[in-house]
């Protein structure tokens, strides 16, 4: 068995790229030869391994190109398509699996089309909803509400939902237009990996019936250490981008006039957060050490997402430190939360409900008990890279065996294979 992992980036720029790099390294250490195909070259040594080869197109992502070049390359990047075609010609489809992590920031859907026109078996990890939704979030930035429209329908095309502009939405629609037919063509030999059961339910309904589905949680790079003494801390902490769909302003408003709250991140909602709560602290996004320090000073982690968050890696990162979590019911990682035991879940956008959660965990004894339970539960079954790799190897084997047998997938909507770690 060999694997070709496909990602715009070869270093940890965002969750998708981080998981791709961690998976590639873990597979190589497991003895699986890996080729990492990327657009933007790596900056560190994370992919240095005798069984791991990096094939890089050597280009910038669309955000560092002119608007014209970004529009053209975002739709169809000929350079990446040619390089990927050359790689596949040198590979054996009988024992090689393709695993797509990310293609929208540089590689473009061209690499998907190259793979679809080849005999290779492939898997797509749905880190977001870009496989089916033009904006990748199922969130309407005009109304600041989740979107329930059918992707690529007339209503979808006309909806002014993009976070940037309607012109940007138009480019997204063009980029997305060919994907439904592509998924139909490959449905008997491709599969999707979802990173939470909730995200799987959202995505599956817009994919062809015979596509195979697997649920494998993202791994986190955590080392077991002493749990945080949360009862000695007062600050409710938010970690992540400060964007409308993340519900940051809801948290600021819910905490106003009674609870210490800090936001570590960057984004457009900074001023709105401070307008809702002048006492809120905005911490600049930092490296792993800065994040670790912020967690060490937290009473609880809060993830108040308004959109259907595919997972939310900060949730297990907090639980691993013995920090209870407050999450909205639109957070995919809520599957890790046992209500009232290691955290609390409330209805998204319900500020009163969120404030009640803050009140509950303002009790030091209650927070300490939840923190102990969080720590115990997480380390009883950690989301380790080794467990993640084992699930990948099993899934790769299933897909290659299916392809070798020529079997067709039975058309059913209940085919998801649960491998939640």
Image: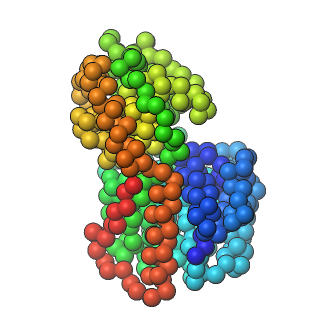
Q: Nearer the viewer, residue 25 or 167?
A: 25
Residue at the (35%, 20%) spot, across then down: 231
Query: x%, y% of residue 171?
Result: 55, 54
Res 73 quadrant in image:
bottom right
Residue at the (76%, 56%) spot, across then down: 58
Is residue 150 left or right of 2 when viewed as pictured? left
Q: Nearer the viewer, residue 91 or 337?
A: 337
Query: x%, y% of residue 96?
Result: 59, 76
Query: x%, y% of residue 254?
Result: 31, 21
Is residue 185 left or right of 148 when viewed as pictured? right
- Which quarter of the figure is the N terminus placed in? bottom right
Residue at the (34%, 30%) spot, across then down: 371
The answer to whether residue 403 of the structure is visible from this angle is: yes
In the picture shown, does residue 63 fall above or below 371?
A: below
Query: x%, y% of residue 311?
Result: 41, 47
Q: Nearer the viewer, residue 130 or 6?
A: 6
The answer to whether residue 163 of the structure is visible from this angle is: no
- Which quarter of the figure is the C terminus placed in? bottom left
């Amino acid at each position: 068995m060999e694997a070709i992992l496909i990602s715009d980036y070869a270093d940890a720029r965002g969750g998708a790229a981080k998981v791709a790099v961690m998976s590639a390294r873990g597979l190589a250490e497991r003895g699986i030869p890996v080729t990492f195909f990327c657009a933007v070259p790596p900056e560190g040594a994370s992919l240095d391994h005798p069984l791991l080869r990096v094939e890089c197109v050597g280009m910038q992502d669309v955000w560092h190109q002119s608007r014209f070049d970004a529009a053209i390359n975002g739709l169809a990047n000929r350079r990446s398509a040619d390089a990927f075609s050359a790689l596949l010609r040198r590979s054996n489809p009988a024992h090689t699996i393709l695993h797509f992590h990310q293609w929208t920031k540089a590689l473009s859907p061209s690499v998907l089309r190259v793979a679809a026109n080849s005999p290779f078996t492939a898997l797509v990890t749905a880190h977001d909803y870009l496989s089916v939704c033009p904006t990748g979030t199922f969130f309407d930035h005009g109304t600041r509400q989740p979107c329930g429209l059918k992707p690529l329908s007339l209503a979808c095309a006309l909806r002014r939902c993009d976070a940037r502009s309607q012109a940007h939405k138009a480019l997204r629609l063009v980029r997305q237009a060919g994907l439904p037919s592509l998924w139909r063509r490959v449905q008997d030999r491709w599969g999707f990996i979802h990173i939470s059961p909730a995200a799987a339910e959202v995505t599956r309904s817009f994919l062809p019936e015979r596509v195979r589905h697997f649920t494998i949680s993202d791994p986190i790079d955590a080392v077991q250490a002493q749990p945080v003494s949360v009862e000695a801390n007062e600050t409710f902490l938010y970690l992540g981008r400060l964007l409308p769909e993340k519900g940051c302003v809801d948290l600021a408003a819910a905490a106003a006039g009674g609870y210490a709250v800090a936001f570590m991140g960057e984004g457009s909602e900074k001023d709105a957060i401070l307008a809702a709560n002048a006492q809120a602290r905005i911490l600049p996004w930092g490296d792993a050490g800065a994040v670790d320090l912020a967690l060490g000073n937290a009473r609880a982690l809060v993830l108040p997402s308004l959109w259907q968050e595919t997972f939310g890696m900060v949730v297990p990162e907090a639980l691993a430190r013995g920090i209870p979590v407050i999450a909205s019911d639109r957070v995919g990682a809520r599957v890790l939360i046992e209500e009232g035991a290691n955290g609390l879940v409330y209805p998204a956008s319900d500020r009163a409900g969120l404030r009640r959660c803050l009140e509950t965990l303002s009790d030091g004894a209650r927070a300490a008990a939840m923190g102990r339970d969080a720590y115990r539960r997480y380390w009883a079954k950690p989301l380790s890279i080794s467990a993640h790799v084992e699930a990948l190897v099993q899934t790769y084997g299933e897909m290659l065996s299916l392809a070798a047998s020529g079997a067709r997938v039975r058309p059913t909507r209940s085919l998801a294979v649960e491998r939640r770690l």
